[in-house]
Image (tube, helix red, strand yellow):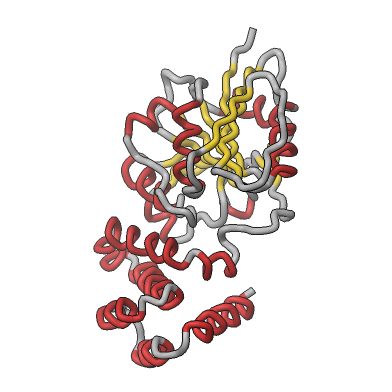
Amino acid sequence: MSNFTLSVVITTYNRPDLIVRAVNSVIAERSHSNNIEIIVVDDASTTSMPAMAVEHLVYHRMPTNGGPGPARMVGLQLARAPWVLMLDDDDTLVPGTADYLAQKLPTLEESAYPVYQFAVSKMNQKEEYRLITFDDYVNKAITGDFTPVFDRQKFLQTRLRYPDNRAGGEHLLWWKIAEKFGIPSYDRPLVCVSDDATVRLTHFSSQVKKAACHKQLADMALAEFGERLRQDHPQEFRRISLARITYSLLDNQRDKSRQYLHDAPLGNKLKTALWAISWLPQPLIHKLFLLYRQRQG
C-alpha cells in the first residue's frame, strides 16, 4: 500500500526525445511505497509526440502555444496527488527523490506553506535550510534555479498563478509567494540538469525573438514591486528598468524606450548611449544586443 503520493508535471514543446527520458526518470522512482502520477502537458507542439503507454500517465495537449506558465497551471489543476513536483522536459529526477521527499516534506496536516523548493545545485543556497523571503531573492541570498514542490491544495487556494507569458517569468510567482508566505528552501538537488536542449528560453537569441514577452515581464515586475524596489532595492529597480528599455528597443518600440529613459535611474552617459541606439536601424540594434550578450558569456 502506497504511503507517499506525488504528481510530477512535465511541460514540453517540440522535444519528443527529451520527454521520453524525463518520463523514464520518473517511472524509475515508483515503488511499493511511492505512488507517482505523471502528467505531461504538451504546449501545442508542432512535432509529433511519442506514444507513451505508461500506467498512471495523463497526457494533455494545450489548444495553443502559450508558454510554460499556462501549461504548468493546467498540470497543477489536473494533478490528483496532494504534492506536485515541476520537472523540465530536458531534465531528469535524481534517483531517490521520491524517498527523500517522503521523509522531508511535512504531513499535509502540518504543511504551512503553498510551495517548498529544492536547489538544483548546492551552490544556489549556502545553508541546508532557509525560509526564503522576497528580500532573499532580490538581495541574491540565493541564486540560480530551484525545483518547486507544491502543496497543491494550499497553492490553488492562494489564487496565485504562473505568469501568462511565453518567455516564462516564473520568478515573479516566487517573489509573490515569498513576500506573502515565505518559501521553505533546501539545498538538496532533486534533478539532474541537462544541456542538450536545442533552444532555451533564457538564451540570448530567444530573448531577441521574444523581446515583447520579456518587456511584458519587466512591466509586470515594476507594476507589482516597483515602489518597493525603488525604495529598498535600487540596484534591482535599475536592472529591471534597464531591461524594460532594452526589450522595448529590441521589439521596435522606440517611442516607449525613449519615454522610459526620462525617468529611469540610469547615468547620463548610459541614457545618452541608449537614446542614440534608439535611432539605429532595427537589425543593427539586434546585432549590438547579441554582441553584448556574447561578450558577457
How many labels sit on residues? 0
Q: Residue 206's x, y, as percent?
A: 56, 65
Q: Is residue 225 left or right of residue 85?
A: left
Of residues 116 and 70, the one drawn nearer to the viewer in this rendering: 70
x 67%, y 15%: residue: 33
**Quadrant where the C terminus is found in the figure:** bottom right
Q: Residue 92's x, y, as percent?
A: 70, 40
Q: Is residue 209 left or right of residue 33?
A: left
Toward the top, the furthest residue is 1
In the image, residue 132 sits, relative to residue 291, either above or below, namely: above
Quarter of the view holding residue 55: top right
x 52%, y 21%: residue: 81
**Quadrant where the N terminus is found in the figure:** top right
Q: Is residue 42 left or right of residue 236?
A: right
x 53%, y 67%: residue: 209
Of residues 281 and 22, the one drawn nearer to the viewer in this rendering: 281
Q: Residue 136's x, y, as percent?
A: 43, 54
x 47%, y 83%: residue: 282
Q: Residue 245's x, y, as percent?
A: 38, 76
Quarter of the view holding residue 234: bottom left
Task: Answer whether residue 280 is visible to the viewer in this image.
Answer: yes
